[in-house]
Amino acid sequence: MTYSVVEAPVAGGLLRGGRWRPEGGDAPTVLLVHGVTAHHGSWFAVADAATDLDLVAPDLRGRGGSRSLPGPAGMREHADDLVALLDHLGLDRVVVAGHSMGAFVSVVLADRHPDRVASLVLVDGGLPLDLPAGMSTDEVIAAVLGPAVARLSMVFPTREAYVDFWRAHPAFSGGIGPELAAYFDADLVEVPGGFASGVSIDRVREDTATQLDPDVLPPALERLRVPATLLRAERGLFDQPEALYSPEVAAGWSERVPLLDVVDVPDCNHYTIAFDPRPAEIVARTIRARTTEAP
Protein backbone atom coordinates (compact mmCIF):
# COMPACT_ATOMS: atom_id res chain seq x y z
CA MET A 1 0.00 0.00 0.00
CA THR A 2 1.10 3.55 -0.68
CA TYR A 3 -0.13 6.41 1.47
CA SER A 4 -0.62 9.99 0.32
CA VAL A 5 -2.21 13.15 1.63
CA VAL A 6 -5.43 14.28 -0.05
CA GLU A 7 -7.11 17.67 0.05
CA ALA A 8 -10.09 19.30 -1.56
CA PRO A 9 -11.54 22.82 -1.56
CA VAL A 10 -14.66 23.16 0.58
CA ALA A 11 -16.50 26.08 2.14
CA GLY A 12 -14.01 27.95 4.30
CA GLY A 13 -10.78 26.29 3.16
CA LEU A 14 -9.31 22.88 2.45
CA LEU A 15 -10.58 19.50 3.63
CA ARG A 16 -7.56 17.26 4.17
CA GLY A 17 -7.05 13.59 4.86
CA GLY A 18 -5.21 10.53 3.60
CA ARG A 19 -5.43 7.83 0.96
CA TRP A 20 -4.14 4.26 1.00
CA ARG A 21 -3.80 2.67 -2.46
CA PRO A 22 -2.60 -0.77 -3.56
CA GLU A 23 0.64 -1.01 -5.45
CA GLY A 24 0.25 -1.29 -9.21
CA GLY A 25 -3.32 -1.49 -10.34
CA ASP A 26 -6.87 -0.32 -10.07
CA ALA A 27 -8.94 -1.18 -7.03
CA PRO A 28 -12.44 -0.41 -5.78
CA THR A 29 -12.54 2.92 -3.95
CA VAL A 30 -14.04 3.19 -0.48
CA LEU A 31 -14.73 6.39 1.46
CA LEU A 32 -13.91 6.03 5.18
CA VAL A 33 -15.47 8.45 7.69
CA HIS A 34 -14.04 8.70 11.21
CA GLY A 35 -15.69 9.35 14.57
CA VAL A 36 -16.55 12.49 16.51
CA THR A 37 -13.21 13.15 18.29
CA ALA A 38 -11.02 11.17 15.88
CA HIS A 39 -9.10 11.85 12.68
CA HIS A 40 -8.55 9.87 9.50
CA GLY A 41 -5.67 7.88 11.01
CA SER A 42 -8.22 5.94 13.05
CA TRP A 43 -8.59 3.62 10.04
CA PHE A 44 -5.01 2.29 10.28
CA ALA A 45 -6.01 -1.25 11.27
CA VAL A 46 -8.68 -1.47 8.57
CA ALA A 47 -6.13 -0.20 6.03
CA ASP A 48 -3.73 -2.94 7.15
CA ALA A 49 -6.47 -5.51 6.50
CA ALA A 50 -7.72 -4.05 3.21
CA THR A 51 -4.58 -3.77 1.11
CA ASP A 52 -6.54 -4.64 -2.03
CA LEU A 53 -8.79 -1.56 -1.76
CA ASP A 54 -8.36 2.14 -2.56
CA LEU A 55 -9.20 3.84 0.75
CA VAL A 56 -9.95 7.57 0.91
CA ALA A 57 -10.18 8.88 4.48
CA PRO A 58 -10.83 12.59 5.10
CA ASP A 59 -10.42 14.55 8.30
CA LEU A 60 -13.80 16.07 9.09
CA ARG A 61 -14.14 19.76 9.94
CA GLY A 62 -12.45 20.57 13.23
CA ARG A 63 -10.23 17.47 13.26
CA GLY A 64 -6.77 16.48 12.04
CA GLY A 65 -5.62 18.30 8.93
CA SER A 66 -9.05 19.95 8.65
CA ARG A 67 -8.98 21.32 12.22
CA SER A 68 -8.87 24.94 11.05
CA LEU A 69 -12.01 24.70 8.88
CA PRO A 70 -14.71 26.92 10.37
CA GLY A 71 -18.17 25.93 11.46
CA PRO A 72 -20.94 25.41 11.42
CA ALA A 73 -20.48 21.67 11.35
CA GLY A 74 -23.08 18.94 11.46
CA MET A 75 -24.15 15.81 9.64
CA ARG A 76 -25.38 17.68 6.57
CA GLU A 77 -22.31 19.93 6.36
CA HIS A 78 -19.96 16.96 6.62
CA ALA A 79 -21.95 15.08 3.97
CA ASP A 80 -21.63 18.01 1.57
CA ASP A 81 -17.89 18.28 2.30
CA LEU A 82 -17.50 14.60 1.42
CA VAL A 83 -19.22 15.13 -1.92
CA ALA A 84 -16.85 18.02 -2.62
CA LEU A 85 -13.95 15.64 -1.89
CA LEU A 86 -15.36 12.97 -4.23
CA ASP A 87 -15.83 15.60 -6.94
CA HIS A 88 -12.28 16.88 -6.52
CA LEU A 89 -10.84 13.36 -6.75
CA GLY A 90 -12.99 12.49 -9.76
CA LEU A 91 -14.86 9.75 -7.92
CA ASP A 92 -18.45 9.03 -8.84
CA ARG A 93 -20.22 6.39 -6.71
CA VAL A 94 -18.41 4.65 -3.87
CA VAL A 95 -18.95 2.35 -0.92
CA VAL A 96 -18.94 4.41 2.27
CA ALA A 97 -17.89 3.11 5.68
CA GLY A 98 -18.28 5.17 8.84
CA HIS A 99 -17.22 4.50 12.42
CA SER A 100 -19.18 5.94 15.35
CA MET A 101 -20.26 9.48 14.35
CA GLY A 102 -18.82 8.79 10.92
CA ALA A 103 -21.63 6.27 10.47
CA PHE A 104 -24.18 9.00 11.20
CA VAL A 105 -22.52 11.20 8.58
CA SER A 106 -22.56 8.28 6.13
CA VAL A 107 -26.31 7.76 6.54
CA VAL A 108 -26.98 11.45 5.93
CA LEU A 109 -24.61 11.41 2.94
CA ALA A 110 -26.57 8.52 1.42
CA ASP A 111 -29.81 10.41 2.01
CA ARG A 112 -28.66 13.77 0.62
CA HIS A 113 -26.58 12.37 -2.24
CA PRO A 114 -27.92 8.89 -3.05
CA ASP A 115 -26.30 8.93 -6.49
CA ARG A 116 -22.84 9.04 -4.87
CA VAL A 117 -23.23 6.13 -2.43
CA ALA A 118 -23.29 2.51 -3.61
CA SER A 119 -23.72 0.99 -0.15
CA LEU A 120 -22.92 1.62 3.51
CA VAL A 121 -20.95 -0.12 6.24
CA LEU A 122 -21.89 1.36 9.62
CA VAL A 123 -19.26 0.49 12.23
CA ASP A 124 -20.98 0.69 15.62
CA GLY A 125 -22.82 3.87 14.74
CA GLY A 126 -25.45 5.38 12.49
CA LEU A 127 -28.57 4.54 14.52
CA PRO A 128 -30.24 7.03 16.89
CA LEU A 129 -28.94 6.74 20.44
CA ASP A 130 -31.27 5.54 23.19
CA LEU A 131 -30.85 8.39 25.69
CA PRO A 132 -32.97 9.82 28.52
CA ALA A 133 -35.24 12.64 27.39
CA GLY A 134 -34.31 16.21 28.19
CA MET A 135 -30.51 15.89 28.17
CA SER A 136 -28.60 18.90 26.88
CA THR A 137 -25.95 18.58 24.18
CA ASP A 138 -23.13 18.95 26.72
CA GLU A 139 -24.74 16.37 29.02
CA VAL A 140 -24.96 13.89 26.15
CA ILE A 141 -21.33 14.52 25.17
CA ALA A 142 -20.13 13.96 28.73
CA ALA A 143 -22.31 10.89 29.34
CA VAL A 144 -21.54 9.12 26.07
CA LEU A 145 -17.90 10.07 25.46
CA GLY A 146 -16.53 10.66 28.97
CA PRO A 147 -12.71 10.88 28.90
CA ALA A 148 -12.63 11.13 25.11
CA VAL A 149 -14.22 14.57 25.31
CA ALA A 150 -12.70 15.59 28.66
CA ARG A 151 -9.26 15.48 27.05
CA LEU A 152 -10.22 18.27 24.64
CA SER A 153 -9.87 20.84 27.43
CA MET A 154 -6.64 19.37 28.85
CA VAL A 155 -2.97 20.24 28.31
CA PHE A 156 -0.44 17.40 28.53
CA PRO A 157 3.19 18.09 29.45
CA THR A 158 4.57 15.56 26.97
CA ARG A 159 3.37 13.49 24.04
CA GLU A 160 3.88 10.33 26.06
CA ALA A 161 1.62 11.73 28.80
CA TYR A 162 -1.17 11.98 26.24
CA VAL A 163 -0.74 8.36 25.17
CA ASP A 164 -0.66 7.40 28.88
CA PHE A 165 -4.02 9.15 29.27
CA TRP A 166 -5.44 6.76 26.69
CA ARG A 167 -3.73 3.79 28.32
CA ALA A 168 -5.85 4.51 31.40
CA HIS A 169 -9.08 4.48 29.37
CA PRO A 170 -11.04 1.28 30.12
CA ALA A 171 -11.61 0.64 26.41
CA PHE A 172 -7.86 0.03 26.01
CA SER A 173 -7.24 -2.24 28.98
CA GLY A 174 -5.83 -4.78 26.53
CA GLY A 175 -2.93 -2.47 25.78
CA ILE A 176 -1.88 0.09 23.19
CA GLY A 177 0.44 -1.03 20.42
CA PRO A 178 2.76 1.15 18.32
CA GLU A 179 0.25 1.89 15.55
CA LEU A 180 -2.46 2.95 18.00
CA ALA A 181 0.02 5.05 19.95
CA ALA A 182 1.08 6.74 16.70
CA TYR A 183 -2.57 7.47 15.90
CA PHE A 184 -3.07 9.13 19.29
CA ASP A 185 0.18 11.08 18.92
CA ALA A 186 -0.94 12.42 15.53
CA ASP A 187 -3.90 14.10 17.24
CA LEU A 188 -1.62 16.48 19.17
CA VAL A 189 -0.79 20.12 18.56
CA GLU A 190 1.71 22.23 20.50
CA VAL A 191 0.18 24.75 22.91
CA PRO A 192 1.58 26.87 25.74
CA GLY A 193 2.60 24.47 28.48
CA GLY A 194 2.77 21.34 26.34
CA PHE A 195 0.45 19.51 23.97
CA ALA A 196 -3.31 19.29 23.41
CA SER A 197 -5.73 17.48 21.15
CA GLY A 198 -6.31 19.27 17.89
CA VAL A 199 -10.03 18.42 17.90
CA SER A 200 -12.35 21.44 18.09
CA ILE A 201 -14.84 21.17 20.95
CA ASP A 202 -17.08 23.65 19.11
CA ARG A 203 -17.33 21.33 16.11
CA VAL A 204 -18.00 18.39 18.46
CA ARG A 205 -20.89 20.30 20.06
CA GLU A 206 -22.33 21.25 16.68
CA ASP A 207 -22.08 17.66 15.45
CA THR A 208 -23.66 16.23 18.58
CA ALA A 209 -26.56 18.68 18.35
CA THR A 210 -27.37 17.50 14.83
CA GLN A 211 -26.94 13.84 15.82
CA LEU A 212 -29.68 14.41 18.41
CA ASP A 213 -31.95 16.36 16.06
CA PRO A 214 -35.00 14.14 15.37
CA ASP A 215 -35.37 15.75 11.95
CA VAL A 216 -31.90 14.70 10.75
CA LEU A 217 -30.95 11.07 11.35
CA PRO A 218 -34.21 9.10 11.83
CA PRO A 219 -35.81 10.33 8.59
CA ALA A 220 -32.56 9.71 6.69
CA LEU A 221 -32.48 6.12 7.95
CA GLU A 222 -36.11 5.51 7.10
CA ARG A 223 -35.53 6.82 3.56
CA LEU A 224 -32.43 4.67 3.05
CA ARG A 225 -32.18 3.62 -0.60
CA VAL A 226 -28.88 1.72 -0.60
CA PRO A 227 -27.87 -1.54 1.12
CA ALA A 228 -26.33 -1.06 4.54
CA THR A 229 -24.68 -3.28 7.13
CA LEU A 230 -24.43 -2.33 10.80
CA LEU A 231 -21.42 -3.94 12.49
CA ARG A 232 -22.45 -3.94 16.15
CA ALA A 233 -19.66 -4.08 18.74
CA GLU A 234 -20.34 -6.48 21.58
CA ARG A 235 -19.32 -4.00 24.31
CA GLY A 236 -19.67 -0.25 24.87
CA LEU A 237 -17.43 2.81 24.84
CA PHE A 238 -15.96 2.02 28.27
CA ASP A 239 -15.65 -1.71 27.53
CA GLN A 240 -18.78 -2.27 29.61
CA PRO A 241 -21.07 -5.21 28.76
CA GLU A 242 -23.82 -2.82 27.65
CA ALA A 243 -23.16 -2.08 23.99
CA LEU A 244 -23.84 1.25 22.33
CA TYR A 245 -26.77 -0.49 20.63
CA SER A 246 -28.58 -3.33 22.33
CA PRO A 247 -29.51 -6.31 20.18
CA GLU A 248 -33.15 -5.26 20.53
CA VAL A 249 -32.52 -1.70 19.31
CA ALA A 250 -30.44 -2.91 16.36
CA ALA A 251 -33.04 -5.53 15.42
CA GLY A 252 -35.81 -2.96 15.67
CA TRP A 253 -34.11 -0.65 13.20
CA SER A 254 -33.37 -3.56 10.88
CA GLU A 255 -37.10 -4.31 10.81
CA ARG A 256 -37.95 -0.66 10.10
CA VAL A 257 -35.29 -0.26 7.40
CA PRO A 258 -35.53 -3.12 4.88
CA LEU A 259 -32.08 -2.46 3.36
CA LEU A 260 -30.30 -2.58 6.74
CA ASP A 261 -28.80 -5.80 8.06
CA VAL A 262 -27.01 -6.26 11.39
CA VAL A 263 -23.86 -8.27 12.09
CA ASP A 264 -22.63 -8.71 15.67
CA VAL A 265 -18.85 -8.46 16.12
CA PRO A 266 -17.74 -10.34 19.26
CA ASP A 267 -14.83 -9.67 21.60
CA CYS A 268 -14.53 -5.95 20.94
CA ASN A 269 -15.82 -2.62 22.17
CA HIS A 270 -16.86 0.59 20.43
CA TYR A 271 -13.23 1.59 19.85
CA THR A 272 -11.45 -1.70 19.35
CA ILE A 273 -13.86 -2.79 16.62
CA ALA A 274 -11.84 -0.44 14.39
CA PHE A 275 -8.46 -0.46 16.15
CA ASP A 276 -7.72 -4.13 16.93
CA PRO A 277 -6.58 -6.39 14.09
CA ARG A 278 -9.14 -9.19 14.50
CA PRO A 279 -12.32 -7.06 14.48
CA ALA A 280 -10.75 -4.69 11.95
CA GLU A 281 -10.37 -7.69 9.65
CA ILE A 282 -14.13 -8.25 9.95
CA VAL A 283 -14.71 -4.59 9.10
CA ALA A 284 -12.40 -4.88 6.08
CA ARG A 285 -14.05 -8.11 4.95
CA THR A 286 -17.51 -6.52 5.15
CA ILE A 287 -16.35 -3.47 3.19
CA ARG A 288 -14.72 -5.70 0.58
CA ALA A 289 -17.94 -7.68 0.15
CA ARG A 290 -19.86 -4.46 -0.42
CA THR A 291 -17.43 -3.37 -3.14
CA THR A 292 -18.15 -6.56 -5.10
CA GLU A 293 -21.85 -5.62 -5.12
CA ALA A 294 -21.32 -2.06 -6.30
CA PRO A 295 -22.26 -1.38 -9.93
Image: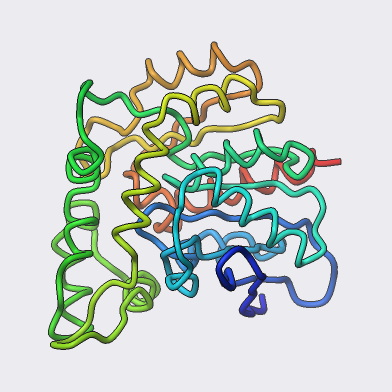
Horizontal arrangement in the rendering, residue 230 relative to residue 23 (left or right): left
- Residue that appears at 76% across and 77% down: 23
On screen, residue 157 above or below 155: below
Residue 292 vs 243, above or below: the answer is below
Which of the two residues, 3 or 241, is positioned nearer the viewer here?
3
Quadrant of the image occupied by residue 157: bottom left
Relative to 147, residue 112 above or below: above
Q: In the image, 84: left or right of 188? A: right
**Image coords of residue 170 (percent x, y):** 17, 52
Residue 181 screen position, x and y as percent: 32, 74
What residue do we see at 58% from left, 32% from top?
229
Question: Which percent across, then down, holds residue 176?
Answer: 27, 67
Q: Is residue 143 above or below residue 204?
A: above
Q: Position of residue 266 (x, y in %)?
A: 38, 37
In front of the other: 132 or 19: 132
Q: What residue do we see at 75% from left, 46% from top?
A: 291
